[in-house]
């Protein structure tokens, strides 16, 4: 990774704890007596979201979440509440950052690499999230959302869009890029197929995009963002 000039981050699941945030926002579901265990709910929700995003690539993320909530309650035979669905759809900005995210980003900012967000959310949702991640260390160099690109990961179009932008703006080539993510389904697997270097942030409690993808092998694996940042710093200093 010594020649890495840009890090492309999946935000939710890697820097932001989407499962804890979703768990908080989905309490009207989890509090129902017939609700399955969280793992079952998240597995079902993940499949529903992926299906909706594939069927309508331009649907904004809050609309995806609201529709996913509706379909989820139907599939699990739970009570549907319109206000609860709307609250879940607008909850993204409240999802918490992982404790190691800001410190790791601060270290990475000092390594002369571009810090790029590649997220399946909409611009308004990410602007709320940005306040949880950016701070004294600075800000992201670029942010690309599904709303900007017009499709959702794991569509290759998303990756090609960002690679082209990095080449045009910074003259950074694909072999100088690393994709840093928790989701194997949405990020690691397609990036591997495109020949990009991949860094899997193995969040131990993660379910969505991880369970069922054990055969997807990243180039590098770390137990958290802080561990990754310190290792890249070591590599850069030794180069």
Image (cartoon, grey):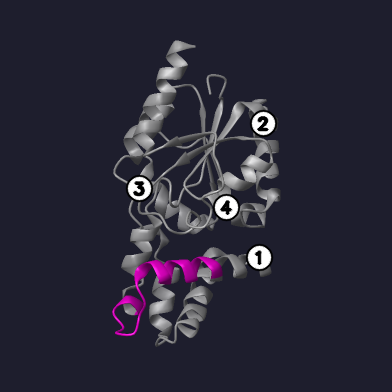
Residue nearest the viewer, comparing 60 with 43: 43
Tell me the tag on residue 132: 3
Q: Given this view, does label 2 or label 3 mark the residue nearer the observer? A: 2
Instruction: Give the image quarter of residue 166.
Output: top right
The answer to whether one can see residue 110 in this image is: no
Neighbor class of circle 4 (other Cα within 10 Å; few <14, some 14-19, many 20+) is many
Label 2 sits on residue: 174
The structure residue drawn at horizontal position 52% and vertical position 80%, both measured from the top left corner, is 71
Q: Judging from the image, what secondary structure is the residue with disc 2 in?
A: helix
Determine which residue is flagged by label 4. 186
Q: Is residue 41 magenta?
A: yes
Instruction: Give the numbered dot on residue 54.
Output: 1
Mark 3 lies on a secondary structure that is helix
> Whole-percent x and y of residue 20?
33, 59
Evaluate whether residue 111 shows in this view.
yes
Mark 3 surroundings within 10 Å by alpha-carbon count, few (fewer than 14), some (14 through 19), many (20 or more) = some
Going from N to C along the chain, the mark reached first, 1 or 2, is 1
Q: CA distance from mark 1 to mark 4?
A: 12 Å
Rendered position, 65 above or below 234: below
Q: What range of the chain is rendered magenta? A: 29-47
* Within-10-Å neighbours for mark 1: few <14, some 14–19, many 20+: some
- Tell me the tag on residue 82: none
C-alpha gap between disc 4 and disc 3: 23 Å
Where residue 167 sits: x, y (%)?
A: 69, 30
First in sequence: mark 3 or mark 1?
A: 1
**Alpha carbon distance from label 3 to label 1:** 29 Å
Q: Secondary structure at mark 4?
A: helix
Q: Is residue 150 above or below residue 235?
A: below
Mark 4 or 3 closer to N-term? 3
Marks 3/1 in contact by CB < 8 Å: the verdict is: no
Question: Can you say whether 16 is above or below 42 in the image?
Answer: above
Residue at 31% in and 74% down: 27
């Amino acid at each position: 990774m010594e020649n890495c000039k840009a890090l492309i981050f999946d935000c939710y699941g890697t820097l932001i704890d989407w499962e804890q945030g979703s768990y908080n926002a989905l309490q009207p579901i989890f509090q129902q007596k017939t609700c399955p265990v969280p793992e079952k709910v998240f597995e079902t929700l993940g499949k529903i979201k992926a299906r909706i995003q594939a069927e309508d690539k331009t649907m904004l993320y809050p609309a995806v979440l609201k529709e996913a909530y509706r379909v989820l309650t139907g599939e699990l035979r739970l009570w549907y509440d319109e206000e609860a669905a709307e609250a879940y759809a607008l909850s993204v900005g409240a999802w918490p950052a992982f404790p190691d995210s800001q410190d790791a980003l601060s270290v990475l900012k000092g390594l002369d690499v571009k810090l790029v967000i590649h997220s399946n959310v909409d611009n308004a949702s990410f602007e709320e999230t940005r306040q949880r991640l950016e701070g004294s260390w600075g800000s992201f160099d670029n942010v690309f959302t599904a709303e900007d690109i017009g499709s959702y990961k794991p569509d290759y179009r998303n990756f090609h869009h960002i690679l082209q932008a990095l080449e045009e703006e910074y003259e950074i080539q694909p072999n100088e890029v690393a994709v840093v993510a928790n989701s194997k389904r949405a990020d690691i697997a397609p990036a591997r197929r495109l020949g990009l270097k991949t860094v899997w942030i193995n969040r131990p409690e993660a379910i969505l995009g991880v369970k069922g993808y054990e055969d997807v092998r990243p180039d590098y694996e770390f137990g958290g963002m802080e561990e990754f940042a310190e290792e890249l710093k070591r590599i850069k200093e030794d180069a």
